Image: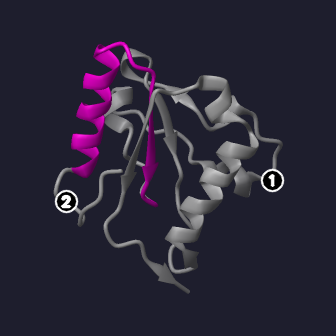
Amino acid sequence: AIYGKGGIGKSTTSSNLSAALSDLGLTVMQIGCDPKSDSTNNLRGGKSIPSVLDALRSGKRIEISDIVYEGFNRILCVEAGGPEPGVGCAGRGIITAIELLRQKNVFDEFKPDVVIYDVLGDVVCGG
């Protein structure tokens, strides 16, 4: 996991580490654990992806393809997302997202050699 306060380059470092490890032939999954859901943008040419929590909030049946996207060099990209602003706890949102990934057998299906968690340094709760 890559931790630290906002604005110090955690997402850039995480993306570069993911890219370097994938260049070595490893299967890499990067999970963004920030309510902004922008950790994997660098790996997807600036394109954002729906977060796991957004998929949950939609109320629709969730398929793995709704929450796991392929990025640069076949890196598996996931964004946990966060609660609505001012409501709930970002830390709980991260746990909920990871629980859903486990329920959907994402780790068993893709069998990543490395999972990189890009975690905001000040996991906040509000509401």
89 magenta-colored: no
Q: Is residue 60 above or below residue 20?
A: below
Image coordinates of residue 100 in percent, x first then y, are 70, 49
Q: Residues within 10 Å of mark 1 (few under 14, many from 20)?
A: few
Label 2: how many residues lie within 10 Å, few (<14), some (14-19) or many (20+)? few
Rendered image: mark on residue 42: none
Quadrant where the C terminus sits is bottom right
Q: Describe the element under mark 2 as helix, strand or loop.
A: loop
Residue type, label 1: Gly
Name which quarter of the figure residue 27 lies in.
top left
Q: Residue drawn 23% across and 66% down?
A: 5
The region drawn magenta spans 10-35
- Residue closer to the observer: 44 or 108: 108
Q: Is residue 62 above or below residue 100?
A: above
Q: Quadrant of residue 43?
A: top left
Q: Residue furthest left?
A: 8
Residue 93, position in %: x, y?
A: 58, 64
Residue designated by label 1: 59
Which residue occupies 68% across, 44% down? 102
Q: Earlier in the sequence, mark 2 or mark 1?
A: 2
Report x, y in % for residue 10: 25, 51
CA gap between label 2 and label 1 equals: 33 Å
Residue nearest the observer in this picture, 87 or 3:
3
Q: Which mark is residue 7?
A: 2
Asked whether residue 75 is in view, the answer is yes
- Label 2 or label 1, whichever lies nearer to me, is 2
The kind of residue tagged 2 is: Gly
| Residue 90 coordinates in the image, percent (x, y) | 51, 69
Question: Does residue 84 show up?
Answer: no
Let me know if residue 18 is in the magenta part: yes
Left or right side of 16 for 96: right
Identified at 60% across, 24% down, the residue is: 110
